[in-house]
């Protein structure tokens, strides 16, 4: 394919000419995928739901771990239900912020990053209180 304005040879999937900046009329790959019946992965929405789940479980299990620190099995439950989804939601939120997501998904991605970070910070504070001796083992 060649540019209509300057005549430079372009790649077939080029959206604009790199030399003069003239649009080629091609649509981006995500637009083509949506028109073909597929949809782009909504990373912002996925991040928001994972962060909401991990925030609630981190508050519940973190408080439970603070009250009953001798239950070590709870640490595995805590990791599976709070820490791993929080880290995944932060990653998905960053992907949504750097992708071609709509504005609604961008706000959900920012909210997801904040919720997951607050949940992880709460768990960190709970661990610090346990280590510092504020929690007494019976």
Image (cartoon, rainbow, N blue to C red):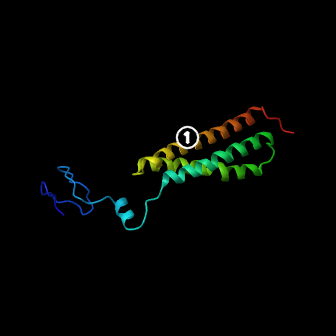
Q: Is residue 136 left or right of residue 120?
A: right
Neighbour tally class for label 1: few under 14, some 14-19, many 20 plus, Cα within 10 Å: some
Q: Is residue 125 left or right of residue 15?
A: right
Which one is nearer the viewer's eye here, 117 or 33?
33
Q: Residue 94's x, y, as percent?
A: 47, 47
Q: Secondary structure at mark 1?
A: helix
Q: Residue at x 50, y 43 (%)?
A: 110
Q: Residue 55's x, y, as percent?
A: 64, 45
Residue 60 lies in quadrant: top right
Residue 68 lies in quadrant: top right
- Give the answer, above or below, for where 119 lies relative to 85: above
Q: Residue at x 16, y 61 (%)?
A: 2
Tell me the quadrant of the picture where the C terminus can be found: top right
- Which residue position is annotated with label 1? 114
In this view, the residue farthest toward the right is 138
Q: Residue at x 68, y 48 (%)?
A: 57
């Amino acid at each position: 394919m060649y540019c209509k304005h300057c005549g430079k040879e372009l790649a077939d999937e080029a959206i604009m000419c790199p030399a003069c900046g003239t649009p080629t009329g091609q649509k981006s790959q995500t637009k083509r995928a949506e028109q073909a019946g597929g949809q782009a992965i909504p990373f912002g929405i996925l991040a928001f739901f994972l962060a909401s789940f991990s925030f609630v479980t981190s508050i519940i299990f973190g408080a439970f771990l603070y009250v009953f620190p001798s239950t070590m099995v709870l640490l595995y439950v805590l990791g599976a239900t709070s820490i791993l989804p929080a880290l995944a939601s932060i990653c998905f939120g960053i992907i949504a912020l750097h992708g071609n997501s709509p504005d609604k998904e961008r706000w959900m991605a920012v909210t997801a990053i904040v919720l997951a970070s607050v949940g992880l910070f709460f768990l960190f504070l709970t661990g610090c209180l346990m280590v510092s001796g504020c929690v007494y083992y019976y």
